[in-house]
């Protein structure tokens, strides 16, 4: 039963209360969350997201910086040993690797397309059929709907390896505004959404998480978000869609497939290349190798990583997948998320896309989210 808009709004405003889990003085890779969302509130969220509201939700603008990126000559070693978890098809058991196998999978990859000037290949998921969006690993990626300041927005995200089989990964700015709060509200995730169709339903959120460095200071170095999902018809999302793997503290020299649902216009200088404009109804994929470091910040902040890619608003939070494949296991490993880009004509800055580097903050975030028990 649909609740009146005023009642829905009143219930959902409660989700903006931030738990006292962190403070400004704490480390930027400390985890921050809102309180857990009640079952009644989740029911109202499910009723709120009609097809019309989903269709008219605005793509969350991809944060942009109007100056040229600063390339770093070198960065320090990873903050700790590599953490590597496997991907899985629906119903698979989440596995986290250790020892020599984890070390082997954590090694860098030789660039496939070169690194400068930010070379990449982009394509729309094909064939353009609903059945393709329902297959592994494409069903894992979806659209994340939410409200902010009374307006409806949409980002991208993906289910990720977690012991509770209930975690969706996205960008921090898709969870909270990065200025001290409050958290966004009315979260709903639609895996494999395709031209207005929701092939495995609409999943509501139990609790959103991000990092202190993003929540209070808006630092792109910590622009990670994680959402613990409620069950749908008694089923955990990881058991229904499958999940990406997870890796942190890897060498920066990787090759990724960056995925998302961009909807903002492809506006390039001096002219837009041929090809379909983004419409927010298709998964768009950039295949690219590491090209640059950025956002050095303070000595303790891990510099972000950049690739060539021209995706736009709506792609925020989409996964950077290492070893992209139709086979599950030591493949399809989440190792980045769409975060921000630059603007400017010389050279074309909107051909570059950046992600926070996955290190201790990403590990802390995943650990906090996967520790949440998701009962019926």
Image (spheres, rainbow, N blue to C red):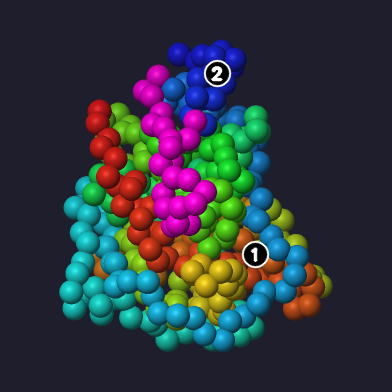
Asked which quadrant contains residue 248, the reply is: bottom left
Please say whether residue 357 is visible from this viewpoint. Answer: yes
The reply to whether the magenta stretch includes residue 26 is: yes
Per the rendering, the mark at residue 341 is 1
Q: Tell me, for residue 70, which label it has, or none.
A: none
Identify the residue shown where x is 61% and y is 36%.
148
Task: Determine the main secondary structure of the stretch shown in magenta.
Answer: loop
* Position above or below: 33 against 159: above
- Residue 10, labelled with which disc? 2
Asked if the stretch drawn in magenta spans residue 330, the answer is no
Taking the spot 32% from the left edge, 61% from the top edge, the residue there is 245
CA separation in Å, label 1 and label 2: 35 Å
Residue 102 vs residue 368: left or right?
left
SS of the residue under disc 1: strand
| 221 to the left or right of 277 | left
- The residue lying at 25 percent from left, 80 percent from top is 104
Task: Answer above or below: position of 337 versus 1.
Answer: below
Magenta part of the chain: 17-40
């Amino acid at each position: 039963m649909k609740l009146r808009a005023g009642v829905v709004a009143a219930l959902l405003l409660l989700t903006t209360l931030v738990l006292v889990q962190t403070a400004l003085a704490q480390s930027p890779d400390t985890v921050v969350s809102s309180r857990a969302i009640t079952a009644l509130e989740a029911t109202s969220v499910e009723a709120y997201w009609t097809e019309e509201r989903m269709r008219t939700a605005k793509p969350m603008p991809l944060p942009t910086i109007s100056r040229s990126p600063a390339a770093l000559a070198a960065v320090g070693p990873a903050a700790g040993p590599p953490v590597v978890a496997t991907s899985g098809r629906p119903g698979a058991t989440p596995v986290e690797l250790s020892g020599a196998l984890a070390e082997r999978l954590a090694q860098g990859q030789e660039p496939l397309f070169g690194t400068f000037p930010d070379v990449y290949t982009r394509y729309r998921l094909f064939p353009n059929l609903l059945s393709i969006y329902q297959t592994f690993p494409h069903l894992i990626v979806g659209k994340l709907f939410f409200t902010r300041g009374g307006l409806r927005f949409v980002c991208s995200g993906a289910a990720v390896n977690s012991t509770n089989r209930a975690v969706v990964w996205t960008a921090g700015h898709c969870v909270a505004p990065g200025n001290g709060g409050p958290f966004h509200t009315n979260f709903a995730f639609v895996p494999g959404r395709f031209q207005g169709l929701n092939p495995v339903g609409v999943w509501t959120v139990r609790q959103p998480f991000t990092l202190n460095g993003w929540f209070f200071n808006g630092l792109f170095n910590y622009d990670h978000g994680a959402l613990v999902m409620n069950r749908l018809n008694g089923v955990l999302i990881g058991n229904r869609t499958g999940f990406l793997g997870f890796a942190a503290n890897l060498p920066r020299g990787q090759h990724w497939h960056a995925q998302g649902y961009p909807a903002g216009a492809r506006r390039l200088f001096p002219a837009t290349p041929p090809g379909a404009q983004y419409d927010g109804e298709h998964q768009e994929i950039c295949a690219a190798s590491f090209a640059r470091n950025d956002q050095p910040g303070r000595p303790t902040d891990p510099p972000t990583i950049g690739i060539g890619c021209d995706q736009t608003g709506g792609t925020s939070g989409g996964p950077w997948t290492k070893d992209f494949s139709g086979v599950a296991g030591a493949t399809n490993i989440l190792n980045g998320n769409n975060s921000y880009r630059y603007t400017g004509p010389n050279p074309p800055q909107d051909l570059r896309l950046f992600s926070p580097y996955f290190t201790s903050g990403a590990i802390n975030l995943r650990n906090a989210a996967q520790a949440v028990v998701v009962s019926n």
